[in-house]
Amino acid sequence: MVVAEDVLRQNQIKATGQRIAILQVLLTANSPLSAEEVWEKLQEPHPDLVLSTVYRNLNLLSEKRLLNRLQLDNERARFEYAGGDHHHHLVCLGCKQVVELDGCPLHEYETSLAKDHDFNVVSHRLVFFGYCPKCDLKQAGGGN
């Protein structure tokens, strides 16, 4: 199990209580979270934590490459721990649910592109947009 305090110290980032709490929320999340969602999850254990502090720390942890900042739609950015396996996402255009896909089928294609174009590829992102079963039913006129 990855421990937030250890991750911060290994990356030479001061392990404040707020940073530990924010990173721990993202380490245990099942999908990328917005700053507001992180803040909401921390309200009970840290009622004095303000949203601007969450934003500031998420931006710092993104700059230090501990978090991936994802712009999955036209709304707010979402964040996820960068130390996990590389993967992609499905985003529902209706309810905004984000589903993480296991693995990445693009490794060979990325290598081929880099070779064919003499290009140093350092990362890529792939996001599929559509409708989850519930929202798809609503789109078809079957839901309330």
Image (spheres, rainbow, N blue to C red):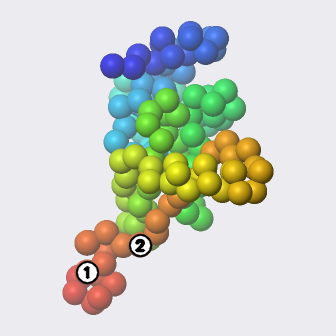
Image coordinates of residue 123 in percent, x first then y, are 63, 45
Outermost residue toward the bottom in this view: 141
Quadrant hosting residue 116: bottom right
**Left-right relation of 12 to 99:** right
Which badge, 2 or 1, is on the more N-terminal residue?
2
Quadrant hosting residue 91: bottom left
Which mark is on residue 130? 2
Image coordinates of residue 39 in percent, x first then y, are 47, 36
- Picture residue at 69% right of the left edge, 32% below the top: 63
- Picture residue at 25% right of the left edge, 81% below the top: 137
Say which element carries label 1: helix
Which mark is on residue 52? none
Residue 111 lies, with reference to residue 50, above or below; the image says below
Outermost residue toward the right in this view: 118
Image coordinates of residue 103 in percent, x first then y, are 40, 46
Say which element carries label 2: strand
- Picture residue at 44% right of the left edge, 49% below the top: 104
**Of discs 2 and 1, which sits in the foreground?**
2
- Where the C terminus falls, by quadrant? bottom left
Residue 113 lies, with reference to residue 69, above or below; the image says below
Residue 59 in view here: yes
Residue 39 in view here: no
Q: CA distance from mark 2 to mark 1?
A: 12 Å
Local packing at callout 1 (Cα closer than 10 Å; few below 14, some 14-19, many 20+) is few
Three-letter code for the amino acid on which mark 2 is drawn: Gly
Three-letter code for the amino acid on which mark 1 is drawn: Leu
Q: Which residue is mark 1?
A: 137
